[in-house]
């Protein structure tokens, strides 16, 4: 029976293992997230394509971004 130092480090090792395991799962989920940050130009193009803004507004905003 090992209840001394080995038992203590074994328990801490198990806790560290689970913390690392959960961290890796969360990291993988974030890496596969399709909602990446978009640039201002991407947002502007989407708004123009969806008809939220006119061509004149699009060109004015595009000049300000670039």
Image (cartoon, helix red, strand yellow):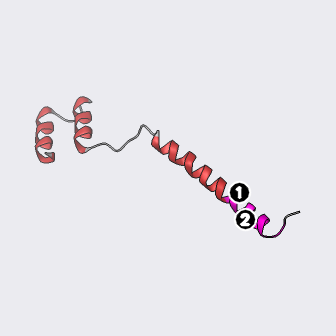
- Label 1 to label 2: alpha-carbon separation: 8 Å
Judged by depth in the image, the label closer to the viewer, 1 or 2, is 2
Secondary structure of residue under mark 1 = helix
Q: Which residue is tagged 2?
A: 9
Q: Image quadrant for the C terminus?
A: top left
- Residue 12 percent across, percent down from the top left: 70, 63
- Residue 16 percent across, percent down from the top left: 65, 59
**Which residue is located at x 57 percent, y 45 percent?**
25
* Residue neighbourhood size for the residue with mark 1, other residues' Cα within 10 Å, grouped as few (<14), some (14–19), many (≥20): few
* Picture quadrant where residue 36 is located: top left
Left or right: 30 as drawn, with respect to 25: left
Left or right: 54 as drawn, with respect to 36: left
* Residue neighbourhood size for the residue with mark 2, other residues' Cα within 10 Å, grouped as few (<14), some (14–19), many (≥20): few
Mostly what secondary structure, the magenta segment?
Answer: helix
Q: Which residues are magenta?
A: 3-15
Nearest to the observer: residue 10 or residue 66: 10
């Amino acid at each position: 029976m090992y209840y001394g130092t080995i038992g203590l480090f074994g328990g801490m090792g198990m806790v560290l293992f689970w913390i690392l395991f959960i961290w890796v799962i969360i990291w993988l989920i974030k890496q596969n997230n399709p909602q990446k940050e978009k640039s201002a130009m991407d947002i502007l193009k989407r708004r123009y394509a969806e008809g939220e803004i006119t061509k004149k507004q699009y060109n004015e905003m595009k000049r300000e971004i670039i």
